[in-house]
Image (cartoon, rainbow, N blue to C red):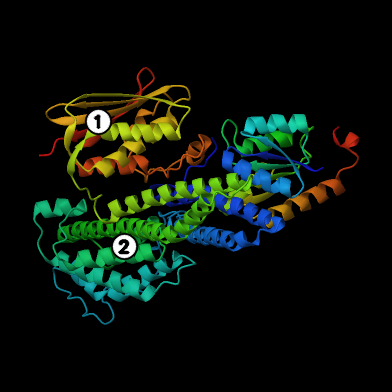
Amino acid sequence: MTKILLVEDNEMNRDMLSRRLMRKGYQVILAVDGQEGVETAASQLPDLVLMDMSLPVLDGWEATRRLKSEPATRHIPVIALTAHAMSSDRGKALEAGCDDYDTKPVDLPRLLGKIEALLAAAAAAAPPPAEAST
Amino acid sequence: MSVEPPAPGAARHALPPALIHDLRTPLGQIIGYTELLVERAEEAGEREMVPDLKKVSAAGYRMLALLEENFASAVTGAPGDAGEGDEVGAGEGDEVGTGGEGGSPPAAGREGVRLADFIAGNREPILAEWEAFARTCTPASGAMDIMSLRDHANEMLTVIAADLRTHQGGHAQAEKSKGNAPADGGHAATAAEEHGADRAESGFTVEQMVSEYRALRASVIRLWTRARGELAPADLEDLTRFNEAIDQSLAESVTRYTKELDDSKEMFLAILGHDMRTPLGAVLTSARFMLDTQELEEPSLTLTSRIASSATRMVHMVGALLDFTRSRLGGGIPIERAAMNMGKAVHDVVDEMAAAHPDRDIDVDARGELQGEWDCARISQALTNLLGNALEHGSPGTVVTVETQGDEHEVAISVHNRGPVIPSGELNGIFNPMKPRDDAHQAAAGGPSGNLGLGLYIADRIVNAHNGRIDVASSEEDGTTFTVHLPRRG
């Protein structure tokens, strides 16, 4: 089952989005701040990360930078989620290493399209996992 | 925290984007939970619920569209990427003589041409140069009417020339150069103010508008000195007066420009608040109706109560938004005094907040004479905001204390919490919601805080309407205390 890590500090958003993703057949694991997000990603190695940008402890940009600088996690696609609909946010997210970007409130069909596209690209690009991690 | 500081020009207008950001969070929850309910209802074949749910989600999307619309205008309306204002377009251009076309040729007497006559006679070349500059800084988006702006510049020149011909007292002169001369129905005020208002409307940045004035000044001075050659003492006096007149116009234009921008921001917030109320009411009523049937099973019950709680939070936000705009546009929050007991009001507010925060301890203490005449509903609102602020910023596990004390002059209510110290630099503007916020997500981090950063502002306005004041003190040793001082009626 495809495993998605959702990093989101707002309890209601976390609950709502994880319910919706689970209904679509994904396994969802959760983290409530950037630090926990980085640790959970390293220990659970999800197939994809949905990263809120405005996070306590460690914000989403920095958390993404850390994920992308670690050999063990750098292959995991990250989709940035932010409530700011400004184009500069998009650039900032991509600069931090996010593979894609979506705005909140989440438009689920659109987000699912992005998730599937990134998962397909990751599957195509990644050689067998044993080689990928070195 | 890596939130970028807002662009310099945008700082004073930081409120709308932050506020719209805050409103989107509960709205996204309403939409998400509703769609979950729709999916479940359709799967379970509970068709009768679906139309109502679709109405809720339609209302959610309507509000979202309202926010998107206003977000766009909030962002484009804020002056941001101003060009460097230092380069003024008064460089080249040789074809100007001492005698203007159209104007009467300057008298070639011993006195020479005074600046006022020179401006009157060379209006066209001055305006042509000014216009060439104005075109270089016209915002690409705003299809604005150069000719009507040129009319303002023309009128300003007329008034400035007339001004130069009349004698000025020393005081008026000093005041004028500070931009403080009274706008006693004079035409200069009107032309300059109109110019500022139009510039704001056309999407000019304040820097661009200032550059225009520099250009106007530079054009006149350059053309004038070239025509005059050697300057006589009278010419210097004219130049000084001319500079002062420009300064005065500029000050008026800038004042109007900023007022215009603030007004339009607050106006759209007011409209936004009103527009949101209807769809929001629909959401809340539907959700409560569904809960009232007592027929919901899990997980629909949880989903629906979450819709109701997000909608309730939005109702509070929109209420705060309307209070804010009312106090800014209508000059204050209206209050109705009636006999009340402050001790009881404080108790009621604390009970309500304690119920909403079962994990927190709130201590209450009341002493002295607490009877008086105030607006009970408004005072409760102010106390709710202050207490909410203390609970939000107080460290978890610490006690929040509310002390009420009455003497013959006033009743003082202090709300105290332990937690991060408010830096002394921020204490000053703590009630000003227009201050740039870098904590848009700090508030969210503490959970569903349900405020727009307007709570302290509204509390301050309410206390102010009672001729009272709120003091703030914050330190490592003593924690943070907001003290409301309410004078007794009189």
Dot 1 falls on a residue whose secondary structure is helix
Identify the residue shown where x is 57% and y is 42%: A12
Residue tagged 2: B196
Which three-letter amino acid code belongs to the residue tagged 1? Gly
Q: Position of residue B57 (x, y in %)?
A: 57, 59
Above or below for B397 versus B8: above
Which residue is at the front of the view, B396 or B187? B396
Q: Position of residue B448 (x, y in %)?
A: 50, 40
Residue B354's quadrant in the figure? Answer: top left
Horizontally, residue B96 falls left or right of residue B296, namely: left
Which three-letter amino acid code belongs to the residue tagged 2? Gly
Residue tagged 1: B343
Q: Chain of mark 1?
A: B
Q: Which residue lies most toward the bottom here?
A: B102
Query: Of callouts 2 and 1, which one flags the residue occurring earlier in the amino acid sequence?
Result: 2
Residue A97's quadrant in the figure? Answer: top right
